[in-house]
Image (cartoon, helix red, strand yellow):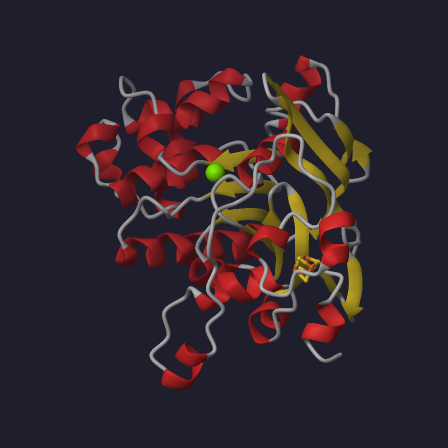
Amino acid sequence: MADLLEVKDLKRYFKTPGGDLHAVDGVNFTLKAGKTLGVVGESGCGKSTLGRVVLGLIEATDGTVLFEGKDITHLKPKKRREMCKEMQMIFQDPLASLNPRMCVEELIMDPMKIVRACRDKETMQKRVYELMDQVGLARRFAYSYPHELDGGRRQRIGIARALVLGPKFLVCDEPVSALDVSIQAQIINLLQDIQEESRLSYLFITHDMSVVKHISDDILVMYVGCMVEKSSSDDLFDHPLHPYTKGLLSAIPVPDIDVEKKRVLLQGELSSPINPKPGCRFAPRCPYAAEECRTRQPAFEEVLPDHFVACHKAREINQL
Ligand code: SF4
Ligand code: MG
């Protein structure tokens, strides 16, 4: 199966008074049709910027994004607008991303008007109702406004808007983080159903390891702009190889005393992404850090089949 999306050595730096902020610093991945890549890491690790650079909402500093084999890294505005039909985004806070003066019907119709996908009101209305059915939003809400609806329903509007042009790829940026746990499960199930029906591919960005496990085929762990580990979701949860991933997984509450004892605690905070020091960016927090970790950046290597990690001591720590 060919790749739908291929991201090669993608970088995004921002100029700041203190120097270059390396928000995304050399990210590589591929994504096939109908699959989900989870991107995890603490807030500030560059995962949201990565999603926006892939979509072209933020210009890449370096690297390439290929969509169905075509280079879409630096498109002119007109071509970029055409790409909206193929690639869309679901946001964390639907209230902030929805125009408060538009009712549900107008909100879902809006993307069709922007790209002039359809001019005929009746056809557009029909499409709105189809989508409301698909995302589980009762038709009686068609003339409600975002503030009149709860968080779960607002996120259903966000999903309907993302789907209205029939995209193949969605960036989901923390789509359930603002929702109650019971509603989170409903939205995750909805995204999975939609994926099955339409063979959509997702880049699913979250800081929540328990959420990412259920939806992802593969997982990419980011730390201060860099990739630190990538594998299938099962491998990552069964045998995390990077000390940072072990720390993230240890933070998930488990009702098992033996597991409790083996927790790796993540202490301290992310180091600054501005003019990052040479060496491993996790070194200031890593219990295994040695001299070479502070001087030489670890390569991102395949340590087990299809299981990549950036750590000088991955083999030693994991007895491989
Ligand atoms: Fe820790 Fe060194 Fe591995 Fe970085 S390279 S994660 S500091 S052991
Ligand atoms: Mg974010």
Instruction: Give left or right: position of 174 versus 288.
Output: left
* Image side of residue 203 versus residue 310, left or right: left
**Residue 238 screen position, x and y as percent:** 58, 76
Question: 55 or 239: nearer the eye?
Answer: 239
Does residue 93 appear in this view? yes
**What is the count of numbered marks?**
0
Reply above or below: 267 against 139.
Answer: below
221, 185: nearer the viewer:
221
Q: Is residue 121 left or right of 287 when viewed as pictured?
A: left
Q: Position of residue 141 (x, y in %)?
A: 23, 35
Q: Is residue 65 above or below residue 252?
A: above
State which quadrant residue 242 falls in.
Answer: bottom right
State whether residue 144 appears in this view.
no
Taking the view exactly as shown, the residue that stands out farthest to the bottom is 258
Residue under the image location 51 percent in, 39 percent down: 44
Q: Which residue is located at x 38 percent, y 48 percent?
A: 176
Q: Residue furthest front?
A: 291
Q: Where residue 162 appears, x then y in whole percent?
A: 48, 35
- Quarter of the image for residue 12 reads top right
Q: Residue furthest left?
A: 148
In the picture provided, is 209 more to the left or to the right than 317? Answer: left
Q: Residue at x 80, y 60 (%)?
A: 301
Which residue corresponds to the image point at 38% horizontal and 27% vertical from the top-left?
A: 97
Question: Where in the figure is residue 70, as x and y percent of width and height?
Answer: 80, 33
Quarter in which the N terminus is drawn = bottom right
Q: Picture quarter containing residue 289?
A: bottom right
Q: Quadrant of ligand 1?
A: bottom right
In the foreground, 191 or 291: 291
Is residue 160 positioned above or below 191 on the image?
above
